[in-house]
Image (cartoon, grey):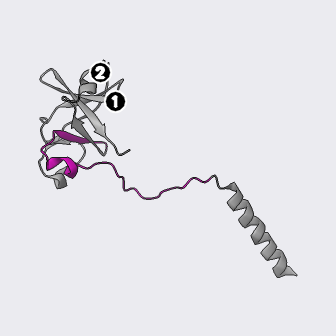
Amino acid sequence: MNSSKLILSLIIMFVLLVGCNDGTTVHLSTKSNNPTPKDYLESDTDIFLLSGYVFSNAQDVDWVKELEYELGEQIGEITKQSEQASQFTNGTANKLPVGTKVFKTDTQAYIAIVEDEEILYLKMVEG
């Protein structure tokens, strides 16, 4: 009798747990499908890495050039230059000089300021 009550209790718990599942899948992997510096350095694209994201120069992207934006808070600063993907860490750029400050805007564009010139960048994310 005791074993049948245990099995019945386990079945009820299983049904409740499955019934409470909302269908969301939790991915424990920290691997992202976002582009990496290696994806851009072979083509000599002007990029930098901040907060784990690659930002790519968007000065020649028509819709970005047409944006009207307001400069927001500073999100980072270029602390190192490198042409080697393996040496890219947060704050590394391949073209921007060390000391360049990077700001977010009220649009999708980010701004790097070099000698009072505002250079437009976009955060490269997958999907």
Image quadrant holding the C terminus, namely top left
75 vs 54, nearest the viewer? 54
73 vs 24, nearest the viewer? 24
* Secondary structure type for disc 1: loop
Mark number for residue 39? none
Q: Which residues are magenta?
A: 23-51
| Residue at (14% x, 35% y) in the render | 96
How many numbered tags mark residues here?
Answer: 2
User: Which residue was labeled with disc 1?
Assistant: 108
* Secondary structure type for disc 2: loop
Give the quadrant of residue 10. bottom right
User: Which residue was labeled with disc 2?
Assistant: 67
| Residue at (83% x, 79% y) in the render | 4
Where residue 56 appears, as percent x and y from the top left, is 22, 38
Where residue 29 appears, as percent x and y from the top left, is 42, 58
Image quadrant holding the N terminus, namely bottom right
Mark 1, other Cα within 10 Å: few <14 / some 14–19 / many ≥20 = few
As drawn, 126 above or below 11? above
The verdict on residue 75 being magenta is no
Q: Are marks 2 and 1 in contact (CB under 8 Å)?
A: yes
Tag 1: amino acid: Gln
Q: Does residue 116 appear left or right of residue 66 in this picture?
A: left
| Residue at (33% x, 48% y) in the render | 34
**In the image, farthest residue toward the right:** 1
Tag 2: amino acid: Leu
